[in-house]
Image (cartoon, rainbow, N blue to C red):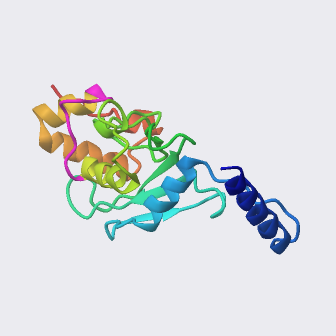
Amino acid sequence: MIRLFKVKEKQRELAENANGGVPIKKQSAGELRLHKDISELNLPKSCTMTFPNGKDDLMSFEVSIRPDEGYYLGGTFLFSFQVSPIYPHEAPKVKCKTKVYHPNIDLEGNVCLNILREDWKPVLNINTIIYGLYHLFTEPNYEDPLNHDAAAVLRDNPKMFESNVRRAMTGGTGSPEVSLSIHMGS
């Protein structure tokens, strides 16, 4: 057993020397798993991933979703992902950075997606989350809302909901909060 540690230590020394004496940062288990998830991504064509802090910071990235069907067709929605070092034992923190009139996304960008909360399991991955977010735009869910007003309009008057989405996506009138709550309907 001691011999194994000496071999590992020697390998680390050789790697540092090859790297100009700069110690190599040890990756956390979460970083290793995230690297695997990213290398195996199979995103829909309408989704892109970027690393605003550079490829050295895999734990923080953004995903852009452009739905190709449904109420949100033509929109582009940006999500930030913050991944914990204990990933996959803890779901990533996901926020929508785009103001949107949506039953499952509130005005602060919080996202109501079951796999980011109570249904998270370590076997799930980043690909699953992105597909879940994409699905929120193709099939918004009024039964588990964060934005209760939008959910009620979607449930009771889908045509008005569509009109509200279009108005919000084109800027509406006034601030996003005002334009996102213009037509609540009854």
Q: Nearer the viewer, residue 16 or 49?
A: 16
* Residue displayed at 76% across by 58% down: 9
Residue farthest to the bottom, as pictured: 18
Residue 40, compared with residue 162, is above or below; it is below
Q: Position of residue 128 (x, y in %)?
A: 32, 52
Q: Position of residue 172 (x, y in %)?
A: 38, 45
Q: Is residue 105 visible?
A: yes
Residue 69, compared with residue 159, is above or below; it is below
Q: Quadrant of the C terminus?
A: top left
Q: Position of residue 102 (x, y in %)?
A: 30, 40
Residue 112, compared with residue 43, is above or below; it is above
Q: Is residue 102 visible?
A: no
* Residue displayed at 19% across by 28% down: 152
Query: For this view, does 89 lie left or right of residue 180?
Result: right
Query: For this view, does 163 lie left or right of residue 66?
Result: left
Residue farthest to the right, as pictured: 21
Q: Magenta segment: does it hold 140?
A: yes
Q: How many marks?
A: 0
Query: For this view, does 149 lie left or right of residue 108?
Result: left
Q: Magenta segment: does it hold 150?
A: no
- Which region is colored magenta? 138-148
* Residue displayed at 35% across by 61% down: 66
Q: Nearer the viewer, residue 168 or 106?
A: 106
Could you say which quadrant of the image residue 84 lies in?
Answer: top right
Residue 84, compared with residue 15, is above or below; it is above
* Residue displayed at 36% across by 57% down: 127
Q: Main secondary structure of the magenta part?
A: loop
Q: Position of residue 85 (x, y in %)?
A: 57, 42
